[in-house]
Amino acid sequence: MHNLILSNFSMHITLNPHEQRQALALLQQKSVNKRTFLLQPGEVNRQIYFVTKGCLRMFYTDQAGQQHNICFYPENWWACDIVSFFKEKPAINAIQALEDTEVSYFTLSRLEELFANVPKFERFFRILTQNGFELYQRRITANLSKNAEERYRQFRKQYPGLEQRIAQKQIAAYLGITPTFLSLLRKDFVA
């Protein structure tokens, strides 16, 4: 578990052994069962999660009760409602486990402590935020300009192998199509 997160850190910053120990000492872990909510709309997101096993999803439920998946977080991804977490505001989105999932996480106070003790983590989380913002921009642009087949191809590229792990209705809710239409797309894609 620690090797995965240390490897994730090393994607953007170089830590000496003392800095690694400091970061790991501030991390907490928990296991969550499939369908468990880590965040509900109206709650403040109190943790930023690193998925060590399993998969989370962030989604928004509209006034008609329709769920719209915003993002999936499989292993080696960070998850949080960033506005709720850093601004300590009530979330409009929910985060839920799609599989039995294990996460490591920082609370905001522990993350601030880490920033003070190991300033290079500010760089790490800035890069993470920039990359996340880029993903959201690409997703919005794709939803506005690409057809369903192109969005499906992009999903498969961004989340390789995930479609074998999660329910088809979750992928359809991400792509903005019906599960039936997704089934037709998948048949055409394999053929």
Image: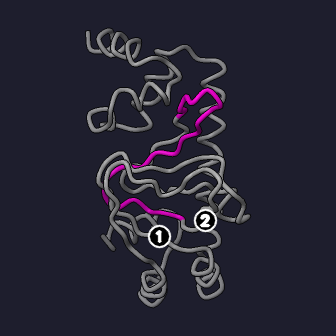
Q: Position of residue 3 (x, y in %)?
A: 32, 71
In the structure shown, which secondary structural element does the residue marked by tag 2 occupy? helix
Q: Is residue 82 magenta?
A: no
Q: Nearer the viewer, residue 120 or 161?
A: 161
Image check: 140 left or right of 74?
right
* Residue 20 percent across, percent down from the top left: 44, 82
Three-letter residue code for mark 2: Phe
Numbered circle sitting on residue 3: none
The residue at which mark 2 appears reads as 125
Q: To which quarter of the image does residue 17 belong?
A: bottom left
Q: What range is drawn magenta here? A: 48-68
Q: Nearer the viewer, mark 2 or mark 1?
A: 1
User: Within 10 Å of the Cα at label 2, are there few (<14), some (14-19), or many (20+) other Cα atoms?
Assistant: some
Asked if residue 148 is positioned above or below residue 58 in the image, the reply reads: above
Residue 105: mark in rendering: 1
Looking at the rendered structure, the kind of residue marked 1 is Tyr
From the viewer's side, name the closer residue of 121 and 84.
Answer: 84
| 118 and 100: which is toward the camera | 100
Q: Position of residue 144 (x, y in %)?
A: 66, 21
